[in-house]
């Protein structure tokens, strides 16, 4: 079936802010850019990160259960599902408000999404995905004394963050529902936080304690829905080389071969920019005419129009 050009737009968890108020405001601005895109004859599928939010939800339950034995500690897959509800609620509301503002009758729906992973994925033994707040070294050392099982990394010069396992996304369990909603012309919000990680055991799905990288999951989603563009929106305008140094150089365009060389040269931080560039490479390679854009959530409209961001293509 022919349709308007499709774009999967992925919103970075860190770029969504740290409080419900910040998130509502940033989502409101992004919704405006997304609706502009639809008015310009694009079909969009929205996905989002959840690193800070899933960590915040888990921490809130852990503090509450320490204070009150009646409150259970919350398993990570359940926290992931809650983060989809929390962020999906803001996105759905902001997009609905924008639709109303421009007098259209489009419909929007968020889908709680599960992503299948391999139970034997070596990532389960090697936590790499930063979640939760950025901590000072003192806060990190205190957290590690309180719970020696926690692992931390320094995250792109912004502080220390807890890291959890991040297996490779294999399959979106709700793929058919997503395609049916798209065929019925819904704006779909899905695969939040990369999807709740699940494994299939004798046909039964079961959550596993991990957080999938939403950029890699967005590449799977973009392939599944036959998107022409994958747009990864974060807190920086462009992918840079020599990032964070006085010699930083922002890049407007990269071929897949150039992007791969820069990955091999260690230009992109693991757990932040590296998975975005890897997701962009995967998508750009998946077919003729596929383009990935990495740009800023604040300049979503300009990135989607090709006036900002880094474009990665074959
Ligand atoms: N080479 C690089 N170019 C640009 N940004 C980089 C680079 N290396 C690391 N970063 C950092 O990666 C961040 C994006 O990753 P992250 O915060 O995990 O994304 P998200 O917005 O999806 O949560 C940027 O805001 C920047 O601080
Ligand atoms: N799940 C995930 O990748 O979230 P962030 O985009 O917030 O890192």
Image (spheres, rainbow, N blue to C red):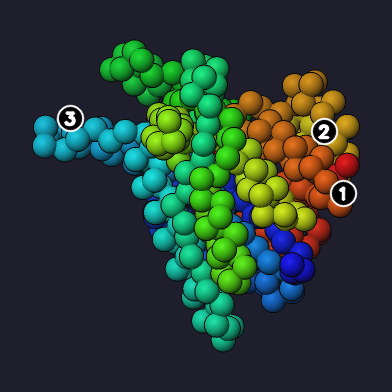
Q: Is residue 238 left or right of residue 84?
A: right
Whole-angstrom CA distance, mark 1 to mark 2, is 17 Å
Q: Is residue 95 visible?
A: no
- Along the horizontal axis of the image, is 137 left or right of 231? left
Residues marked 1 and 2 touching at CB (< 8 Å): no
Q: Whole-percent x and y of residue 112?
A: 44, 52
- Say which residue label 2 marks: 259
Q: Which mark is residue 220?
A: none
- Dot in front, 1 or 2: 1
Q: Label 3 to label 2, Cα distance in Å?
A: 46 Å
SS class of the residue under badge 3?
helix
Depth order, front residue of 58/77 = 77
Q: Position of residue 14 (x, y in %)?
A: 53, 43
The location of residue 303, given as percent across then percent down, is: 74, 57
Q: Earlier in the sequence, mark 3 or mark 2?
A: 3
Quadrant in the picture for residue 105: bottom right
Mark nearer the N terminus (3 vs 1): 3
Residue at screen point 65% across, 63% down: 44
Residue named by callout 1:
288
């Amino acid at each position: 079936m022919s349709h308007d050009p499709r774009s999967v737009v992925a919103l970075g968890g860190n770029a969504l802010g740290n409080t419900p108020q910040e998130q509502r405001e940033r989502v409101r601005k992004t919704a405006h850019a997304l609706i502009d895109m639809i008015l310009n004859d694009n079909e969009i599928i929205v996905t989002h990160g959840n690193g800070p939010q899933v960590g915040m939800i888990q921490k809130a339950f852990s503090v509450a259960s320490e204070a009150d034995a009646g409150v259970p500690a919350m398993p990570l897959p359940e926290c992931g599902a809650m983060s989809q509800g929390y962020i999906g609620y803001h996105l759905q509301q902001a997009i609905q408000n924008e639709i109303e503002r421009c007098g259209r009758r489009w419909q929007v729906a968020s889908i709680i999404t599960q992503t299948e992973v391999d139970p034997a994925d070596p990532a389960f033994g090697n936590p790499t995905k930063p979640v939760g707040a950025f901590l000072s070294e003192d806060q990190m050392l205190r957290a590690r004394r309180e719970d020696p099982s926690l692992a931390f990394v320094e995250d792109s010069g912004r502080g220390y963050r807890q890291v959890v396992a991040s297996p490779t996304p294999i399959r979106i369990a709700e793929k058919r529902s997503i395609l049916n909603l798209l065929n019925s012309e819904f704006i779909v919000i899905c695969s939040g936080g990369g999807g709740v990680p699940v494994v299939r055991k004798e046909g039964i799905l079961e959550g596993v304690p991990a957080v999938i990288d939403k950029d890699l999951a967005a590449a799977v989603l973009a392939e599944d829905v036959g998107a022409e563009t994958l747009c990864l929106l974060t807190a920086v305008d462009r992918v840079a080389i020599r990032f964070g140094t006085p010699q930083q150089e922002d890049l407007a365009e990269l071929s897949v071969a150039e992007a791969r060389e820069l990955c091999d040269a260690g230009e992109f931080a693991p757990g932040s920019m590296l998975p975005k560039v890897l997701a962009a490479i995967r998508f750009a390679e998946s077919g003729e005419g596929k383009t990935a854009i990495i740009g800023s959530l604040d300049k979503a409209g300009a990135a989607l129009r090709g006036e900002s961001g880094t474009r990665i293509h074959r």
